[in-house]
Image (cartoon, rainbow, N blue to C red):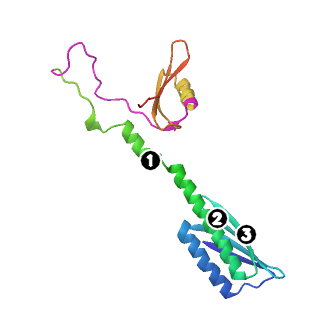
Amino acid sequence: MKLTITGRHLTITDDIRAHLQKRADKIEARFGPLLELHVVITAEKHRFEAEMNVTAARAAFHAEGRTHDLFASLDAVTDKILSQIRRYRERVKDRRHGKLPRRDVVAQLNPPETAELQETETSAPAETPRIIEAPEKFAAKPMTVTEAATELHAAGDTLLLFLNADTRQVNLLYQTEGGAYGWVAPLFT
């Protein structure tokens, strides 16, 4: 992590640098590796202003704090950054909540080879349809119904089985003889 400290109307002492290093370590412990932490400390007539910019791989945070004590300003701005990090982590957690990881979805859609149905002449009567032993596999990438219709049209097929990005369920899109599209979504009661 690159720690940059800028002082305006103020000389950066070793105590200030050590205090900021402790605060940077605390931020890094909560969030993970940081790319850059930039702190600007401004001394005014009767107060100190601290401004902190934190840059990480996927997020950036900014906070400002003003008090009459230098170290209190640094603590206040660090607390604001930690609060932003907490809210960011909760948003990421909520975004992922309820969604299956991609490998679990693929495992549900493509059962293992040992679970395949196999036809035996003794168990099936002559008038029942023949079961195909090797099912056709497909890539279960999530897409919207509009994207699925575009892909079905581009492929020139009549059927497309896809994972609906909105509901996270397997849907079927088909093209009728008249050229219109039909859409089948599961209904669980």
- Residue 52 is situated, as x and y percent measured from the top left of the image, at 70, 70
Say which amino acid is labelled 1: Pro
Eyeballing the image, is 111 above or below 75?
above
Residue at the (61%, 68%) spot, across then down:
82
- Residue 13 is situated, as x and y percent measured from the top left of the image, at 70, 87
Circle number at residue 64: 3
Say which amino acid is labelled 2: Thr
Residue depth check, mark 2 versus mark 3: number of the one nearer the observer: 3
Residue where numbered disc 1 is placed: 101
Residue depth check, mark 2 versus mark 1: number of the one nearer the observer: 1
Residue where numbered disc 2 is placed: 55
Magenta span: chief secondary structure: loop
Asked which secondary structure carries label 1, the reply is loop
Residues in magenta? 122-146
Say which of 84 and 178 sits in front. 84
- Measured in 3D between alpha carbons, the distance from the residue under mark 2 to the one under mark 3, in whole angstroms, is 15 Å
Image quadrant where one finds the C terminus: top left
